[in-house]
Image (cartoon, rainbow, N blue to C red):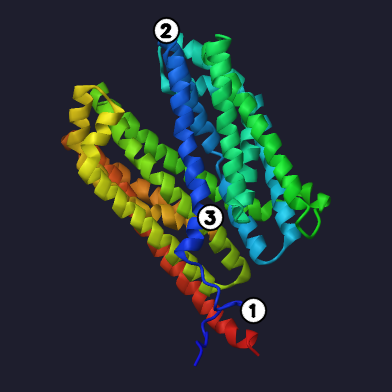
């Protein structure tokens, strides 16, 4: 006898179509590859400016890049929120909704981007004051920032476009956009800094032009893709704020959640600075291990966002469970491999990242904390993807602040242990975040499955 599927799902569910690790990998690999290009760009920025005769130029680019990584990624909800809502519209087969979501996200990106330009002077002055560099570096960083701030509308619009394509499982297009962005940026870095001698300002101009080049390419890809979509765009809905309610609801929680995550990271760095430059540098080296692991985990989480959002849109809880399990298998595989790599080759990786004997020795002392990190962090990456796809972003907001509520007391109680206490608090923060997200997931799944069981008999009549 064939398998009879009695589990609740949307009418029309095809039991033969199951999300597998191969399906997740097909969506994830372009994202993983595009993630790898990000540190490559940072290396080129550092290399071209680091070979100038004065170190203040490198300091200026470092300060400016740090400022914009916080400023722009604070609005990263434009990527995440657009992905979740778009994937659900795809699941409902609502092409008009897919079109409208991109248009609304682009309007929000333009409004926020223009506001950042208008408020650029106080924002840049305050941000650089917090970073507290030398007087010479601060002056150059301010010049860098006042050039790069004009890229705000393009950067935020690119977030929306990337999220829109990920939500439709078009991850190869996102790869093309990011490769173009970083490729143009690297070439212009070399032209403006090495060729024209524009120093740190040249790096800012390269980023500005690259961001608008990516936007032009992205909009072209949107136009091509829209010719294949059904439905139509309701222009009237763009100018009625009530039609933005779903996007605002999802994004407001993501915004607060991102602020919490940025605070936790900044607090860790600020406290490490109190232990001296050697400890600060050692922690910075170890945090690169987290970035290395995140390349793959982010890719699987983004793939999960698209598949889970589609399943939620279809009210298909069989596919929902398949997507979570498939993404979970690959995420756990990467986490385990990372732990093994750090345990076996951690000292070698540290040596690749720094030549300073004191920093190497200090980083090696704290390496065991880093070996444990993937086992705790993997769940937060995976479940963030689940909740973005399900657009249950309130859970992401609440759990990050719950984790901070235990992070700060844990740090205060372990101050006597120095940097070991700081690492313990940070890992405890990660553990609480993952565990609370897990509890929210179990509650969400139980609620949805129960609701589906109640309506399933009616749907099968």
Q: What percent of the width, then of the height, locates residue 396?
A: 47, 53
Vertical relation: 121 (above or below) 210: above
Neighbourhood count class around disc 1 (C-alpha, 10 Å): few under 14, some 14–19, many 20 upward: few
**Which residue occupies 56% across, 83% down?**
454
As helix, strand or loop, the secondary structure at mark 3 comes to helix
The residue that label 3 is drawn on is 27
Q: Quadrant of the C terminus?
A: bottom right
Q: What percent of the width, then of the height, locates residue 242?
A: 73, 53
Q: Nearer the viewer, residue 120 or 291?
A: 291
The residue that label 1 is drawn on is 12
Q: Is residue 219 left or right of residue 366?
A: right
Q: In this view, does 288 lie to the left or right of 98?
A: left
Which of the 4 quarters of the picture holds residue 107?
Answer: top right
Which of the 4 quarters of the picture holds residue 412?
Answer: top left
Q: Circles 2 and 3: CB distance less than 8 Å?
A: no
Vertical relation: 174 (above or below) 130: below
Q: Which of marks 2 and 3 is nearer the N terminus?
A: 3
As helix, strand or loop, the secondary structure at mark 1 comes to loop
Q: Earlier in the sequence, mark 1 or mark 2?
A: 1
Q: Earlier in the sequence, mark 3 or mark 1?
A: 1
Which of the 4 quarters of the picture holds residue 343?
Answer: top left
Vertical relation: 450 (above or below) 131: below
Q: Circles 3 and 1: CB distance less than 8 Å?
A: no
**Which residue occupies 29% across, 36% down?**
286
Give the Cα separation between the discs numbered 2 and 3: 44 Å
Q: Nearer the viewer, residue 291 or 246?
A: 291
Q: What percent of the width, then of the height, locates residue 113?
A: 65, 33
Q: Circles 1 and 2: CB distance less than 8 Å?
A: no
Neighbourhood count class around disc 2 (C-alpha, 10 Å): few under 14, some 14–19, many 20 upward: few
The residue that label 2 is drawn on is 54
Q: Can residue 54 be seen in this view?
A: yes
**Which residue occupies 54% across, 50% down?**
253
């Amino acid at each position: 006898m064939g398998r009879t599927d009695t589990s609740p799902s949307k009418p029309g569910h095809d039991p033969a179509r199951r999300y597998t690790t191969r399906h997740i990998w097909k969506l994830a690999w372009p994202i993983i590859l595009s993630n790898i290009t990000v540190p490559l760009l940072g290396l080129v920025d550092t290399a071209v400016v680091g070979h100038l005769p004065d170190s203040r130029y490198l300091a200026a680019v470092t300060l400016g890049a740090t400022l914009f990584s916080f400023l722009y990624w604070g609005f990263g909800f434009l990527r995440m929120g657009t992905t979740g809502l778009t994937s659900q519209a795809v699941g409902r087969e609502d092409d008009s909704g897919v079109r409208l979501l991109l248009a609304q996200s682009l309007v929000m990106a333009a409004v926020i981007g223009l506001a950042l330009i208008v408020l650029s002077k106080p924002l840049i002055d305050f941000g650089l004051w917090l970073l507290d560099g030398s007087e010479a570096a601060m002056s150059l960083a301010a010049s860098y920032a006042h050039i790069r701030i004009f890229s705000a509308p393009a950067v935020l619009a690119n977030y929306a476009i990337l999220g829109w394509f990920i939500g439709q499982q078009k991850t190869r297009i996102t790869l093309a956009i990011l490769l173009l962005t970083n490729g143009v940026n690297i070439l212009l870095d070399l032209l403006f800094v090495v060729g024209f001698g524009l120093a740190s300002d040249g790096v800012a101009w390269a980023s500005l032009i690259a961001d608008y080049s990516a936007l032009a390419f992205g909009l072209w890809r949107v136009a091509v893709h829209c010719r294949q979509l059904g439905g139509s765009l309701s222009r009237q809905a763009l100018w009625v704020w009530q039609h933005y309610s779903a996007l605002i609801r999802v994004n407001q929680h993501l915004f607060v959640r991102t602020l919490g995550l940025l605070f936790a990271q900044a607090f860790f760095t600020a406290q490490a600075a109190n232990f001296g430059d050697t400890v600060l540098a050692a922690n910075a080296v170890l945090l690169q291990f987290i970035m290395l692991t995140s390349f793959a985990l982010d890719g699987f989480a983004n793939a999960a966002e698209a598949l889970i959002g589609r399943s939620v849109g279809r009210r298909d809880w069989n596919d929902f469970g398949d997507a979570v399990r498939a993404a979970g298998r690959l995420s756990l595989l990467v986490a385990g491999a990372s732990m093994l790599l750090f345990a076996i080759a951690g000292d070698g990786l540290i040596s690749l990242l720094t030549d300073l004997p004191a920093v190497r020795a200090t980083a090696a002392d704290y390496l065991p904390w880093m070996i444990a990190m993937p086992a705790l962090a993997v769940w937060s990456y995976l479940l963030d993807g689940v909740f973005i796809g399900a657009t249950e972003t309130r859970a992401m907001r609440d759990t990050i602040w719950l984790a901070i509520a235990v992070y700060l007391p844990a740090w205060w109680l372990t101050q006597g242990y120095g940097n070991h206490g700081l690492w313990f608090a940070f890992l405890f923060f990660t553990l609480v975040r993952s565990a609370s997200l897990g509890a929210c997931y179990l509650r969400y799944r139980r609620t949805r499955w129960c609701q589906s069981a109640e309506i399933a008999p009616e749907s099968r009549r």
